[in-house]
Image (cartoon, rainbow, N blue to C red):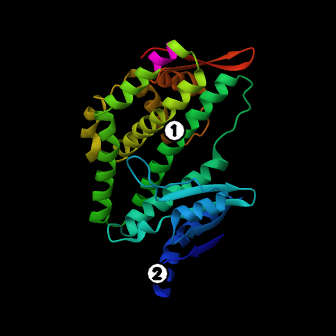
């Protein structure tokens, strides 16, 4: 595994590389090691991501946040690109370590997660979503566990960062009328035009943001006892209901039991996705998406 640092003085580059050595150390504990080819801290994050992907469209600035890391799979192996924003004064060793470990878990999960051959197109789609969300939940909780295992006094910045991030994820869930109303509006439009692809295109970003905000929020709450009080805020979300809690309980059970076989959770993810007006079904042509009311 190669580590390339493009920012800072020679002394700073050495310190950053020393921090990143933990990923190399963790990789060497697995046989075979995960296919992490290179870690890069570039001067220009977006430019480097586009360069490796062979694109010119990647933009790390999203609607509500800016990406600080990106995993890129190539035929040669996996690249982990880390934003230079992580080396500003708002961060310290603990906050950076949490991100390093989170991203490493994503790389590791690509090898560890069970990949079942599923003949049913609808079950295949549900499994894909089931694993995508569990990957985020697992990566966060495992990173927290590893930091705890170091038996070091957590820094004030790390504690503050965790609280800030949890509030960041909960905020769009408390005030989720925008997402909910947009999806409701797209359902009404679908009743007129009947174009499934158009409906999915117009609602996908809302599903992605809300569903990940939910699993991220619960990953913090499930690890840190002091955050349990935030559960009541999640229940204000139009997307958090019995179906959602059932899915989160499933993820908790799998994480606590060390299992990565999620094949018994298809009905749970199907129920959860119905919160967004979507139900998948097999048909003679392959896969059909029913647009349902919410």
- Report x, y in % for residue 45: 52, 64
273 relative to 73, above or below: above
Q: At 51% from the left edge and 13% from the top edge, which residue is drawn?
A: 192
Main secondary-structure element of the magenta-colored stretch? helix
In the picture, measured across the screen, residue 101 lies left or right of residue 181, that is right
Residue with the mark numbered 2:
8
Q: Quadrant of residue 249?
A: top left
Q: Are the residues at dot 1 and dot 2 in contact (C-beta closer than 8 Å)? A: no
What is the x, y in percent for residue 217?
37, 41
Q: Quadrant of the N terminus?
A: bottom right
Report which residue position mark 1 lands on. 133
Residue located at (58% from left, 65% from top):
48
Residue 153 can be seen, yes or no: yes
**Residue farthest to the front?**
193
Stretch of the chain drawn in magenta: 187-191
Q: Nearer the viewer, mark 1 or mark 2?
A: 2
Residue at 32% in and 57% down: 161
Mark closest to the chain's N terminus, 1 or 2: 2
The part of the image, by quadrant, that contains residue 153 is: bottom left
From where the camera sits, is residue 33 visible? no
């Amino acid at each position: 595994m190669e580590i390339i640092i493009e920012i800072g003085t020679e002394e700073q580059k050495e310190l950053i590389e020393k921090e990143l050595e933990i990923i190399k150390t963790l990789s060497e504990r697995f046989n075979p090691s995960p296919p992490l080819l290179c870690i890069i801290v570039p001067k220009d994050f977006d430019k480097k991501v586009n360069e490796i992907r062979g694109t010119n469209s990647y933009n790390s600035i999203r609607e509500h946040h800016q990406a600080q890391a990106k995993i890129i799979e190539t035929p040669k192996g996996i690249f982990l690109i880390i934003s230079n924003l992580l080396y500003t004064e708002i961060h310290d060793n603990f906050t950076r370590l949490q991100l390093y470990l989170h991203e490493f878990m994503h790389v590791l999960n690509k090898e560890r997660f069970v990949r079942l051959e599923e003949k049913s197109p609808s079950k295949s789609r549900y499994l894909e979503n089931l694993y995508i969300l569990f990957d985020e939940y697992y990566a966060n909780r495992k990173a927290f566990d590893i930091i705890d295992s170091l038996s070091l006094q957590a820094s004030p910045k790390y504690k503050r960062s965790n609280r800030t991030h949890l509030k960041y994820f909960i905020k769009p869930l408390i005030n989720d009328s925008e997402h909910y109303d947009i999806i409701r509006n797209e359902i009404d439009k679908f009743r007129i035009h009947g174009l499934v692809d158009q409906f999915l295109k117009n609602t996908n970003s809302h599903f992605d943001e809300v569903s990940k905000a939910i699993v991220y929020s619960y990953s913090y709450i499930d690890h840190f006892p002091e955050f349990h009080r935030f559960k009541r805020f999640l229940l204000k979300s139009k997307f958090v209901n019995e179906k959602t809690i059932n899915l989160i309980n499933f993820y908790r059970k799998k994480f606590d039991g060390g299992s990565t076989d999620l094949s018994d959770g298809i009905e749970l993810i199907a129920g959860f996705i119905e919160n967004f007006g979507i139900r998948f079904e097999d048909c003679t042509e392959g896969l059909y998406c029913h647009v349902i009311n919410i």
